Amino acid sequence: MFIHNLVVGAYASNCYIVGSETTGEGIIIDPGAAADQILRTVKDLKLTIKLIVITHGHSDHIGATLKVKKATGAAAAIHADDAPLAEEQLSGYRITPVDPATAVIDRQLKSGDSIDVGELHFMVLHTPGHSAGGICLLGHGVVFSGDTLFQFGIGRYDLGGSYPQLMNSIRTKLMTLPDNTIVYPGHGPSSTIGAERTGNPFLSG
């Protein structure tokens, strides 16, 4: 497995392209902006993208989804609790319910679901608090933490989220992982669970 990180958009969001050297298949996590750059990178990496996984429905993590989805033919997946938010962000405010025939989101995830693409296998961790349907993806010794956990920081909770819920998600879903688990957040540099356990001011106390 290899991980290629692109920093995209005005909010410097991390878009991760995760691929298998063996099968040439991959997934894209959080295509927030810069669709052309993402697609060029996919081509350079010689990957066939099978799935687009969105960690939560905020615009800085989903902005390029439509274009990337159309170009790759990949399905798009997000937690069920953030699917309406994602559809709203991508398609404008709707007066009527989303027509399944025109919905952008193809797969609604829940906690414990498995993301399986070739030899890539990740488990969905539902980590609400930044948003209702925020998720992390765990597998292969790494966790993609979206806007739940950052290097020495945590996600915002003032955009319809909840601080107690966010902290509970971090403590019960992430701080139970081995110290050497690499954390790939939605913004900023990578870290490890061990480093966050001891050095993150929201957690070390």
Image (spheres, grey):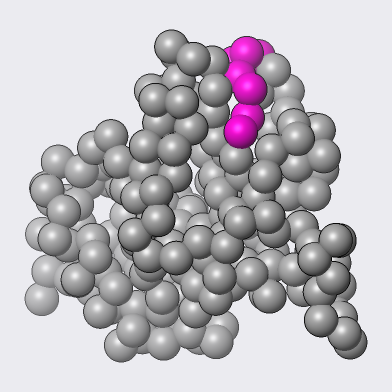
Q: Quarter-wise, where is residue 52 in the image?
A: top right
Identify the image quadrant of the N terminus: top left
Residue at 19 percent across and 71 percent down: it is 171
Which image quadrant: the C terminus? bottom left
Depth order, front residue of 152/166: 166
Q: Is residue 125 visible?
A: yes
Residue drawn 45% across the image and 20% down it: 20
From this view, report whether residue 67 is shown above or below residue 118.
below
The residue drawn where x is 30% and y is 88% is 164
Residue farthest toward the front in the current orientation of the protein: 101
Image x and y of residue 194, in percent: 13, 51
Q: Is residue 12 above or below residue 148?
A: above
Q: Is residue 58 magenta?
A: no
Q: Is residue 62 left or right of residue 23?
A: right
Q: In the figure, 192 relative to 125: above or below?
A: above
Q: Is 48 on the left or on the right of 180, as rendered? A: right
Instruction: Give the image location of residue 112, x and y in percent.
Output: 34, 59
How many numbered discs?
A: 0
- Residue drawn at point x = 68 percent, y = 75 percent: 84
Q: Position of residue 98 (x, y in %)?
A: 81, 74
Q: Between 170 and 23, which is closer to the camera in this rendering?
A: 23
Q: Position of residue 8 (x, y in %)?
A: 65, 44
For residue 201, say whether it is visible: no
Q: Describe residue 85's horizontal placement relative to residue 151 as left or right.
A: right
In the rendered view, tell whether residue 191 sits above or below residue 141: below
Residue segment shown in magenta: 44-50
Q: Quadrant of residue 166?
A: bottom left
